[in-house]
Image (spheres, rainbow, N blue to C red):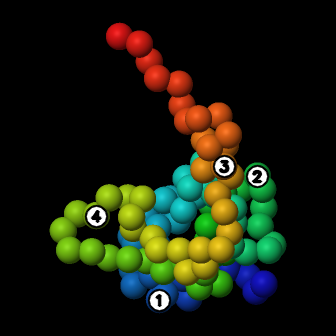
Amino acid sequence: MKDLRIDEMIAKAQNKFLLVNATIVRAKQILAGSLPYVDDFDPTDAITTALKELSAEKLKIKIGKGAAKPLEMIEEVEKERPSLAKEEKKKTGGAPKKKK
């Protein structure tokens, strides 16, 4: 993959604020267990992986009317890769419920 160029990234994201927000949202998803959509990812750096995904156009930045929820801001282009976090919840039955 070619080097990440900030000018190209901003052009794809429309402005630098959307680029930063989309990168943060995707990095949080990767840290939560979502598998990366690029082959040359760094398992210790979720931000670089998110930027590589946006640069490779594996994700689209979705802008809705009004204030969108942060996790709904990016739309996955390829949905065939499963998330590790979802599989773990199915195996363990989800998070334990707290008693009051």
* Foreground pick, 80 / 3: 80
Q: Which sits earlier in the primary sequence, circle 1 or circle 4? A: 1
Q: CB atoms at circles 2 and 3 under 8 Å apart?
A: no
Compare marks 4 and 2 and give the one earlier in the sequence. 2
Compare residues 46 and 2 and report the one nearer the observer. Answer: 46
How far apart are the alpha carbons under marks 4 and 3? 27 Å
On the rendered image, what quadrant is the C terminus found in? top left
CA separation in Å, label 1 and label 4: 21 Å
In the drawing, does residue 7 fall left or right of residue 49? Answer: left
Q: Position of residue 48 (x, y in %)?
A: 67, 65
Q: Position of residue 81 (x, y in %)?
A: 68, 69
Of badges 3 and 1, the one in the foreground is 3
Whether residue 10 appears in this view of the structure is: no
Residue 13, how many percent across, how many down? 45, 81
Q: Quadrant of the N terminus?
A: bottom right
Marks 4 and 2 sit apart, C-alpha to C-alpha, by 29 Å
Looking at the picture, tell me which residue is in the foreground, 69 or 9: 69
The residue pinned by badge 2 equals 44
**Residue highlighted by disc 3:** 87
Q: Earlier in the sequence, mark 1 or mark 2?
A: 1
Q: Amino acid at mark 2?
A: Thr
Indicate which disc residue 68 carries.
Answer: 4
Residue in the picture at 53% in, 74% down: 76
Q: Is residue 96 left or right of residue 31?
A: left
> Closer to us: mark 4 or mark 2?
4
Q: Position of residue 30 (x, y in %)?
A: 63, 56
Q: Give the residue at x 71% y 56%.
A: 45
> For the point 59% across and 85% down, which residue is it?
57
Circle 1 SS class = helix
